[in-house]
């Protein structure tokens, strides 16, 4: 706020120079932000106020803060005007049709004023604060705003049609011409609150007065407005019509209904002094009843304990008295009556903040050193970061998508007896369902990229939460990892994304995954179930044709969705250390023909359960299908490595083991030795 040094001094029992004002207000929480000396020698200063201290957007309240901080006495300027005219109710009226938007509206009537220049002292104060003097009526409203922080307005009573004020909502398309030299007419709507006469709006409530009811040199009878409006409503109207004013900035921070009367009295008295006239008796008022005075108590023991400073109770009372809280000490409690303009004071801790703000935050103890304890990295966070790094290295791009999807998309990824969770919010629009599968996000991103011309070679992943109602009606939520990869053919896509999952399991859990084909999964066809040491991990497969059509995707798309918990729960994996082998091993490849439905995991399980002597490792080499193998069968090649820890193993020692394994594979899996 732009302030005048000499204007603030008008309210102090002894003046404070610019440096003292800046230092004291900064210490009280109102930062000094620049100074300028005007041609007549007056000094104006820029003082910052926080958003919750709208009461200090005026000289009187800044003077109160300064007086409290420096031990001065505040001198109040207001005095009640004397009404000598007829009853105001017989001259004008006020009707408030929207008490929610306008909690309180008051009006006073003065007749027989003479419009002319305002006195020199008033013009000087306005210029000090960066204002341009207009005439005595307008200058008085600007003076009261900058003095007491209450926006007011003056209407030419003769220009009001019907001589009554109506606080109401505007009608659709209703025109309004704001005040201002280059102002243009605007169209209002039901979202706008207006001050109107019997036929038209004469002001946009809390934002701007209207040109059609403004005072001019011919004005003799006036109606003085002093009111309060809903801060959110004022802000919305100001932004919607791109009209900002000193009044709107003040109302946006909140004006208490009980703070209106003192400012209205001050305005009426100033107009009587500068423009003459007769004040009609009585105040025209409409709106909700005044809220009760707020009373907040503070415990001195709590104040000392929270601040860590041994403050005397009398110091607390003195500080609160200087700020206008009328404190009363009762035992271990200080009861305070909150001034109406202090809308930021609601709780005990607010009073404690006021005490230390005034007595000085430099009294708070500051530790020379802060002891900290470094915590070990969270394994779950590290596991997620490791997964992201690995996927990025494998050519995947992370995407982050919205959790809401359309009903059709949700249904495509729900199984029998499962239901989507809906959001009861009209803002959700056409996407009212929480995603039942993490896959919906990367697939939507894939479609968006296809629309932008990227039709192949894209790999996407997303880590997110999915939601649904299970078959028992219980709410289910889990964190999952979804993988989407373009493929040139189904076999290539499936193998590629399976390799990614096996690499993830190795890096995060240190154990292999088991894959079981033939699973039925919504959105996938064909699909396989993936498990980790017997625990369900997720599914892998190709995007089903139905889901592809629904999402508008062409071509072969390999997909997988994994539960993240089984992976991160095993992180970091144990990596046993072992010496390098001292003796050479023997490698043996074994090709067996088995049924086409036999998974590799079954072959691996049979070999491990046989516990072959000296077996070091077993690995999958490849699969062959053709007429040499026969219909419905496939040839699986496995590579086994045998090694002795203390001597060189000879091939002849391995042959009996191979024979035993072949017989066991034939018995358990119906395998036939091919080579």
Image (spheres, rainbow, N blue to C red):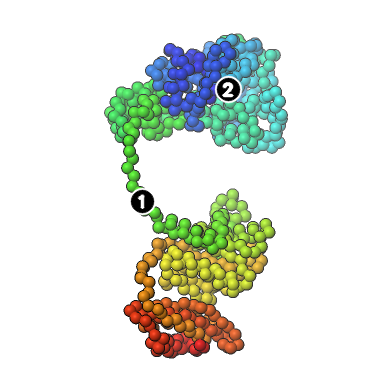
Does residue 381 appear in the picture of this structure?
yes
For the residues labelled 2 and 1, say whether their Cβ atoms are less than 8 Å apart.
Answer: no
Name which residue lies at 52% across and 76% down.
517
Name which residue lies at 58% across and 26% down.
247
Find numbered disc 2 in the image and state the secondary structure of the residue it sits on. strand
Query: In the rendered view, does 610 fall on the left or right side of 138?
Result: left
Name which residue lies at 58% across and 62% down.
459
Q: Which residue is mark 2?
A: 152
Query: Looking at the image, is 164 positioned above or below residue 119?
Result: below
Image disc number at residue 375: 1
**Quarter occupied by residue 493:** bottom right
How many discs mark residues in the rendered view?
2
Residue 544 point in image, percent of width and height? 61, 70
Residue 527 point in image, percent of width and height? 55, 72
**Quarter occupied by residue 342:** top left
- Of residues 48 and 204, the one nearer the viewer is 48
User: Reading the chain from its start, which is encountered first: label 2 or label 1?
Assistant: 2
- Of residues 114 and 550, the one nearer the viewer is 550
Name which residue lies at 40% across and 62% down.
572
Residue 602 point in image, percent of width and height? 46, 80
Does residue 471 appear in the picture of this structure?
no
Query: Looking at the image, is 235 positioned above or below residue 495?
Result: above
Distance from label 2 to label 1 (Cα)?
A: 58 Å
| Mark 2 Cα-neighbour bin, 10 Å: few <14, some 14–19, many ≥20 | many
**Quarter occupied by residue 41:** top right
| Mark 1 Cα-neighbour bin, 10 Å: few <14, some 14–19, many ≥20 | few
Residue 294 point in image, percent of width and height? 42, 30
């Amino acid at each position: 706020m732009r302030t005048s040094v000499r204007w603030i001094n008008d309210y102090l029992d002894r003046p404070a120079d610019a440096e003292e004002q800046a230092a004291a207000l900064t210490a009280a929480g109102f930062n000094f932000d620049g100074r300028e000396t005007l041609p007549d020698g007056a000094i104006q200063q820029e003082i910052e106020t926080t958003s919750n201290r709208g009461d200090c957007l005026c000289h009187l309240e800044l003077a109160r803060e300064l007086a409290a901080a420096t031990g001065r006495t505040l001198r109040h300027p207001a005095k009640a005007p004397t009404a000598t005219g007829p009853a105001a109710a017989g001259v004008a009226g006020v009707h408030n049709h929207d008490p929610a938007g306008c909690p309180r509206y008051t009006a006073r009537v003065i007749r027989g004023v003479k419009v002319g220049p305002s006195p020199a002292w008033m013009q000087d104060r306005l210029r000090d604060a960066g204002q341009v003097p207009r005439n005595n009526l307008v200058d008085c409203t600007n003076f009261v705003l900058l003095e007491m922080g209450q926006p007011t307005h003056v209407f030419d009573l003769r220009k009001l049609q019907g001589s009554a004020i109506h606080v109401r909502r505007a009608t659709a398309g209703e025109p309004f011409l704001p005040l201002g030299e280059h102002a243009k007419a605007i169209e209002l709507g039901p979202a706008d609150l207006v001050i109107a006469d019997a036929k038209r709006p004469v002001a946009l409530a809390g934002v701007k007065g209207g040109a059609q009811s403004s005072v001019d040199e011919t004005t003799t009878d006036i109606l003085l407005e002093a009111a309060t409006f809903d801060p959110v409503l004022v802000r919305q109207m100001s932004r919607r019509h791109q009209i900002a004013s000193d009044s709107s900035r003040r109302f946006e921070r909140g004006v208490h209904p009980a703070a209106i009367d003192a400012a209205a009295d001050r305005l009426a008295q100033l107009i009587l002094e500068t423009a003459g006239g007769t004040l009609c008796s009585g105040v025209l008022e409409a709106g909700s009843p005044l809220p009760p005075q707020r009373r907040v108590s503070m415990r001195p023991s709590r104040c000392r304990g929270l601040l860590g400073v041994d403050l005397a109770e009398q110091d607390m009372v003195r500080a609160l008295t200087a700020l206008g809280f009328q404190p009363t000490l009762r035992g271990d409690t200080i009861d305070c009556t909150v001034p109406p303009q202090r809308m930021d004071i609601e709780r005990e801790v607010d009073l404690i903040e006021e005490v230390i703000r005034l007595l000085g935050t430099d009294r708070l103890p500051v530790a020379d050193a802060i002891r900290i304890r470094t915590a070990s990295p969270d394994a779950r966070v590290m596991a997620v970061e490791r997964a992201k790094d690995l996927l990025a290295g494998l050519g995947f791009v992370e995407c982050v998508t919205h959790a809401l999807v359309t009903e059709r998309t949700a249904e495509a990824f729900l199984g029998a007896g499962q239901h989507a969770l809906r959001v009861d919010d009209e803002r959700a629009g056409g996407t009212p369902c929480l995603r039942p599968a993490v896959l919906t996000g990367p697939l939507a991103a894939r479609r968006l990229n296809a629309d932008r011309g990227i039709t192949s070679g894209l790999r996407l992943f997303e880590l997110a939460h999915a939601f649904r109602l299970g078959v028992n009606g219980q709410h289910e939520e889990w964190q999952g990892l979804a993988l989407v990869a373009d493929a040139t053919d189904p076999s290539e896509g499936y193998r590629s994304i399976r390799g990614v999952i096996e690499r993830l399991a190795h890096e995060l859990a240190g154990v292999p995954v088991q894959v079981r084909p033939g699973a039925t999964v919504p959105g996938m066809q064909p699909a396989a179930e993936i498990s980790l040491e017997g625990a369900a991990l997720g599914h892998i497969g190709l995007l089903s044709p139905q889901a592809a059509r629904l999402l508008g995707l062409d071509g072969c798309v390999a997909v997988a969705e994994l539960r993240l918990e089984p992976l991160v729960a095993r992180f970091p994996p144990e990596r046993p250390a072992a010496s390098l082998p001292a003796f050479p091993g023997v490698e043996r490849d074994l090709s067996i023909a088995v049924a086409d439905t036999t998974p590799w995991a079954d072959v691996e399980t049979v070999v491990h359960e046989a516990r072959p002597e000296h077996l070091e490792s077993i690995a999958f080499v490849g699969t062959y299908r053709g007429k040499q193998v026969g219909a419905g069968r496939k040839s699986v090649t496995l590579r086994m490595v045998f090694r002795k820890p203390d001597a060189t193993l000879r091939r002849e020692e391995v042959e009996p083991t191979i024979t035993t394994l072949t017989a066991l594979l034939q018995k358990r899996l119906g395998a036939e030795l091919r080579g």
